C-alpha cells in the first residue's frame, strides 16, 4: 500500500513539474521528435542509396493453381450475391391480418 502511495506521489510531482515548466518540456519533445525523424530519414534515404540492390537468382513464377482457386472463389461469391437479389425475405414489420383479430 505504501509503495502505491509513493508511486502515485512521484507521478503527481512529475506532472506538476511538467505543468510548471511547459515550454522547456515542449522544446524537449520537439528535439526528441526531430532526432527520431532525422534518424529514420537517414536510414531510409541516405543508407538505402548506398546499398547494392539484391539480385534475384530465380525469376518470379506465376502460380496458376492458386490463381484458379481464387477465381473460383470469386465466381462462387458472385453467384451467391446474385442469388440474394431474388431471394424473398419475410417481412418482420408487417403482421398478417389473421393474427390481428383476437
Image (cartoon, rainbow, N blue to C red):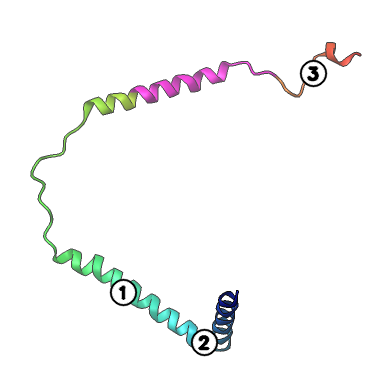
Instruction: Identify the disc placed on residue 23.
Output: 2
The residue wearing badge 1 is 38
Residue for point 37% across, 24% down: 73
Q: Which residues are magenta?
A: 72-90
Query: How far separated are the C-alphas under marks 2 and 1?
Result: 22 Å
Residue for point 19% across, 68% down: 47
Mark 1 burial class by Cα count in 10 Å: few <14, some 14-19, many 20+: few
Residue for point 8% across, 44% down: 57
Say whether disc 2 or disc 1 marks the residue closer to the N-terminus.
Answer: 2
Q: Is residue 84 left or right of residue 79?
A: right
Residue 43 in the image, given as x and y percentages of width and height: 24, 68
Q: Quadrant of the N terminus?
A: bottom right
Report if the CB atoms under discs 2 and 1 are less than 8 Å apart: no
Q: Magenta stretch: residue 86 in it?
A: yes
Q: Is residue 81 left or right of residue 2?
A: left
Say whether disc 2 or disc 3 marks the residue closer to the N-terminus.
Answer: 2
Amino acid at each position: 500500500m505504501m509503495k502505491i502511495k509513493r508511486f502515485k506521489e512521484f507521478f503527481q510531482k512529475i506532472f506538476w513539474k511538467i505543468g510548471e515548466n511547459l515550454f522547456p518540456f515542449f522544446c524537449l519533445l520537439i528535439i526528441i521528435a526531430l532526432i527520431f525523424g532525422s534518424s529514420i530519414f537517414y536510414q531510409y534515404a541516405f543508407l538505402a542509396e548506398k546499398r547494392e540492390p539484391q539480385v534475384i537468382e530465380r525469376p518470379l513464377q506465376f502460380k496458376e493453381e492458386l490463381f484458379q482457386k481464387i477465381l473460383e472463389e470469386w465466381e462462387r461469391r458472385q453467384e451467391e450475391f446474385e442469388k440474394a437479389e431474388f431471394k424473398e425475405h419475410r417481412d418482420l414489420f408487417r403482421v398478417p391480418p389473421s393474427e390481428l383479430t383476437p
